[in-house]
Image (tube, rainbow, N blue to C red):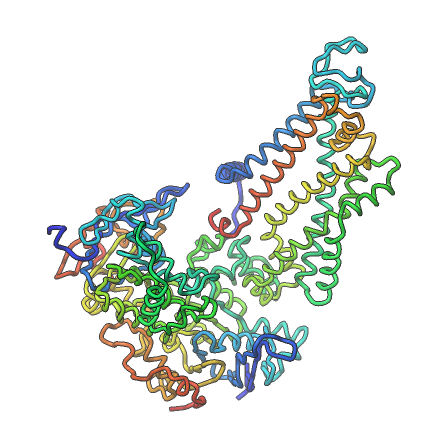
Amino acid sequence: MSTSDFKGLRVKDLKVYYDTPEGVVKAVDGISFSLVQGKRLALVGESGSGKSTLSMALMRLTRPPGRIADGNIFLDDVDILDLDVEEMRLSRLSEISLVPQGAMNSLNPVLKIKDQILDGLFDHQVSGDKKISKDEQKTRVSELLTAVELLPSVGDMYPHELSGGMKQRVAIAIATSMDPKVIVADEPTSALDVVVQRTVMQTLGRLQEGLEASIVLVGHDMGLVAQFADFVGVMYAGKMVELGPVNSVFEKPLHPYTRLLIRSLPTLENKEDFIGIPGLPPPLLNLPPGCTFCTRFDRENKNDPPWKEVSKDHWISECNVCSDIGK
Amino acid sequence: MGSLLEAKNVTKIFGGGLFSKEEELIAVNDISINLEVENPKIIAIAGESGSGKTTLARLLLGLIDPNEGSVEYLGKNLKEMKGKVRRDFRREVQPIFQDPYGSYNPFYKVDHVLYSPIKNFKLASKGEEARNMVEKALELVGLVPSETLGRLPHQLSGGQRQRVMVARALLLQPRIILADEPVSAVDASLRATILDSVKKLNNDLGISVIYVTHDLTTAYQISDEIMILYKGVLKEAGPVEVVIKNPKHPYTQLLIDSIPQANPKLKWGKLDISETQELLDQPGIGWRDS
Amino acid sequence: MTTSTYTETDWKIRYKKRFFNFLRYVRRNPSLGVGLGFLLSLFLFVVIGYAVYDTERFRPLKTGTDLAPFEYDSKKGRDGYPLGTDRQGRDVMSVMIVGVPLTIQIGLIAGIIGITVGTVLAFVAAYFGGWIDNIIRTVVDVGLTIPGILILILIAVNLQSGLTVTQMGLAVSAVAWVWPARTIRSQVLVMREQLYVEIARLSGTGAISIMFKEMLPNLAPYIGASFVGSVASAILASVGLEALGLGPFDSPTLGMTIYWNIQFSSILHGMWWWFGPPIVVLAIIFVGLFLITAGLDEWSNPRLRKRV
């Protein structure tokens, strides 16, 4: 398909590797997906799946010893991996922004909220332009705070005067301040109470729809995924094993890992016996080639399972050797 | 029948006082729990941050003293316990904490956390007896001794570390285990195995469990009874099937409505209830049977 | 099943592996490496010096006086000395070879005593809290406000007659324990709140065991860095005292050499071979010790420890 037609985020065969003294850790090893503008994608995985590495890579914030080894990240028709440092810096916040995990720690404790919001805006002004007037600043900050359901007076407060939920909303306000095309949210509510989590996610969702932006939600809470996302991508040991519409994936998961994962989740519907996933997630150092999930069950498939679209918009990493597990 | 561990109208206040600048915080406000000797149950103490559940747990463990009310073990007030009686209490009421990394001394292998109480409480007289106890306890929680012992804490996964903690609790053959958010820091797929071990402790070994958590779903899965705390006050309590399936207090209803269920067809936020403080501050309705 | 028997080759392999792991770590931590390198070079200097050089010539009037390096010694009829001599006929090279270990010895005595006393006080104060902590803390805080040099001068003046190097070390140790006591106490306070300490308590571990077996091993790198810092300040203090003339007169410590330099105005006479070496060696010692402290600091930082 012609790259100039597609509006949204398209990741092709992305690889992010870490160079450690003991060898190369392939944290993200060939991930591909497309996200149409305006839709919500959730990337789920457990520890060691590579999801946090992926969210950092989307922002090109990978730090050594990590490096983006291969692949493309297309925002509409521009590969952001081809941009130079200055162009990328300007793209962050205005084109693609991040709501970080634990925003309570990413806010500067000695600056007022309004200064932190304006900080990003000032940084993106093209040099030579006149500065935004004080009045315009005040209006913009008010608008942004109201959009995340905070009172404009919050702008004059310091982070320590706010609750966890309020701080997270400020982080969302900052991330949406320049109407970006893509919002990457890395476990945005992990430290929040259940009720606050719901209201913050609902606010985030409303904002995203208003801006017609896309959201990439990274996390491990399948419940959140079911409630919030349109599409879900399941990650395991650096690879994506299943990607599809939320309803299909939850109703009829096609990859054994997804199947076992969903089955291990406790529900409020009835009490039943727990079925965990046996074994351990594999260490990412010097992974042998082939299907990683097979090795967890003492099976072997030395060939890398192909990434196939098995029904509309529903892709899986198709391995014949372990596809029956959990049926 | 006889009471095993009982908190009688305990209240714990932090700060305040004539000379303190801090505002007074009533962390736990007049709460009572009773664990019986016969009929060991799993009771969940559920609440969000600031609900007082952790403070209540520490009161029950005897790590802090209540300002009002008392905590009694086998009829004796914890505050007055000394010497052997207190040591017995320490052995018979064991914790499992939330942090599977911080619970381990990074300098030692994980064996240390298992052998140390055996030595201190003189649970085995010979090295071989001790080793058997340790291996049996590890196997009971689904771990392979030869793959677990001799490792340093960072060499095991969070789930394994937490299971070793459960094994440690088992080793001491306690009568009560107090588990404070034992699976929050663990991957979803491993939670099931750990919670399963905890449930087995109750079913097979007759150990009472107090399960402190903010996760109502896991609380529902393993507990017999549940207590819902909000800002230090007990809002609702009773058999878990009754409270979860048919919540009566607005706070409980709000909590359950906000849980993101792993089923796209069961949407959250269906209740039109807005978080008006009045509704939530409504007094607790206490224990119900139905 | 869990006991294993080591064969002799297993031991050798284990130690070799540990040594190479250490070397690899040193490569990642250049401060530590360079610092250790500096000290190692001084060590080699002293060892080789004692082996090949005549070290008796550190005493005054064992050679001709005032000779530049390699200048012919007419008094003894020989071809001169690599670092020349001073105004009292000391062979400067001998002085350096003998003096360096003496100065370091003072630092070590004071450092070891200082750290031991400081650590014990710190643990007792931090672990038990209450009035014990209050008393120790007050003593330490008062001790910190009194200028150490005053106390040292008082002690040194009273010990004047025939002050030996060991006595010098003991004198400096009188003030060396104060700062470690304070800093280690803060560390123990933090450590006391660690979850594993609470679990040890709930496992029936007694207070002393907790201090020695649970907390101390984890504080070892920090105490190590503190120790190195103590040694450095002890050396500095001793050099200061000696330069003032309050040191062991018969020993060629670096500080005493500086004292003699001052007495005989070596700078005015342009005797660079006499005032140069002690200054260079002191610089190597201090920079080396400082780099080691920085390196140890990095090692004891918990963020780094998880990787190693």
Of residues A127 and A199, the one nearer the viewer is A127
Q: Residue at x 36, y 86 (%)?
A: B247
State which quadrant residue B214 falls in.
bottom left
Regarding residue B206, the answer to whether it shows in the image is no
Of residues C222 and A102, the one nearer the viewer is A102
Q: Tell me residue A138's x, y (percent).
A: 36, 67
Left or right? Give the position of B185 relative to B273: right
State which quadrant residue A249 falls in.
bottom left
**Residue B257, above or below A49:** below
Left or right? Give the position of B172 relative to C68: left
Q: Tell me residue A54's x, y (percent).
A: 30, 53
Q: Residue at x 19, y 61 (%)?
A: A37
Of residues A314 and A122, the one nearer the viewer is A122
**Residue B61, above or below C206:** below
Q: Tell me residue B177's x, y (percent).
A: 50, 73
Q: Tell me residue B206's x, y (percent).
A: 47, 77
